[in-house]
Image (cartoon, rainbow, N blue to C red):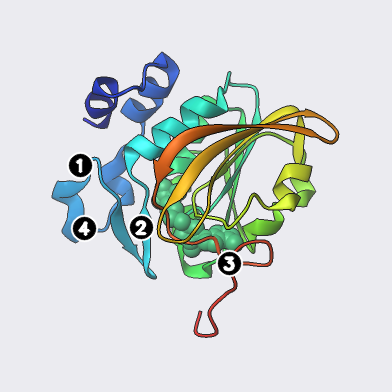
Amino acid sequence: MVADHLRRRDINDPQVLAAFATVPRERFVPDPLLERAYDDVPLPIGSGQTISQPYVVAITAQALALTGHERVLEIGTGSGYAAAVLGQLAREVHTVERIEELARTAAIRLVELGFHNVYVHHGDGTLGWPSNAPYEAIAVAAGAPRPPPALLEQLTIGGRLVVPTGPSEQQRLVRITREGHHQYVEEDLGDVRFVPLLGEQGWPVPTSS
Ligand code: SAH
């Protein structure tokens, strides 16, 4: 069980642990990797992308301090796994994926599994998803060179953004809390390694993708 791994580390929020116990990670992993679905590692999901490591999803979810009432934005849907977990902790989740095939597959999977408060959108998430803004919480599941300004703008006052930032090989996971219109406080949550956030306010998109 994923929740057992997490409890042994520093994940102690009972709601977060309950959310992990509810979402069947094996349904988000390609069939040939099924037996590894409950290992605490990222796994390939096609299109050169990965389903996030449960521990990192848990750190992010815990840092967002969700109470069940929030509108949450996630950037980087991938398999939809983290969005499903966040959906257990918040009122609704909007998740944005730049690779159309992944967005489509994740949307179908989430509906099939009954995660009806998770809405998948296809587009460049470095620009956020303005039509549903502002958000009480934003999670970014790909490494950005710096926090995208569009995401900072789409936070409510009091809202939290968790984003991996820094060079492409290794990032710091940071939580940024919007304390006023132009006032943001940043906290360091540790070293992480994510696939790059590609787009207008992220890393340049390689000409082949
Ligand atoms: N949270 C996912 C894993 C995400 S991997 C899960 O639980 O499965 C990171 C994802 O971010 C990849 O699918 C990648 O295509 C996507 N991504 C990268 N740049 C993006 C951007 N600008 N907008 C939206 N998605 C992006």
Q: What element carries label 4?
A: helix
Is mark 3 in CB contact (under 8 Å) with mark 4? no
Is mark 2 in CB contact (under 8 Å) with mark 1? no
Sequence-wise first label, 3 or 4: 4
Sequence-wise first label, 2 or 3: 2
Query: Please, is residue 115 above or below residue 17 in the view?
Result: below
Q: In the rendered image, which residue does mark 2 sit on?
A: 50
Q: How crowded is mark 1: few (under 14 residues within 10 Å), some or many (20 or more)?
A: some
Q: Which of marks 2 and 4 is in front?
A: 2
Q: Is residue 158 left or right of residue 109?
A: right
Sequence-wise first label, 1 or 3: 1
Q: Nearer the viewer, mark 1 or mark 3?
A: 3
Q: Residues within 10 Å of mark 2 (few under 14, many from 20)?
A: some
Residue 137 rendering spot, x and y as whole percentages = 64, 33
Q: What residue type is labelled 1?
A: Asp
Sequence-wise first label, 2 or 1: 1
Q: Which of marks 3 and 4 is in front?
A: 3
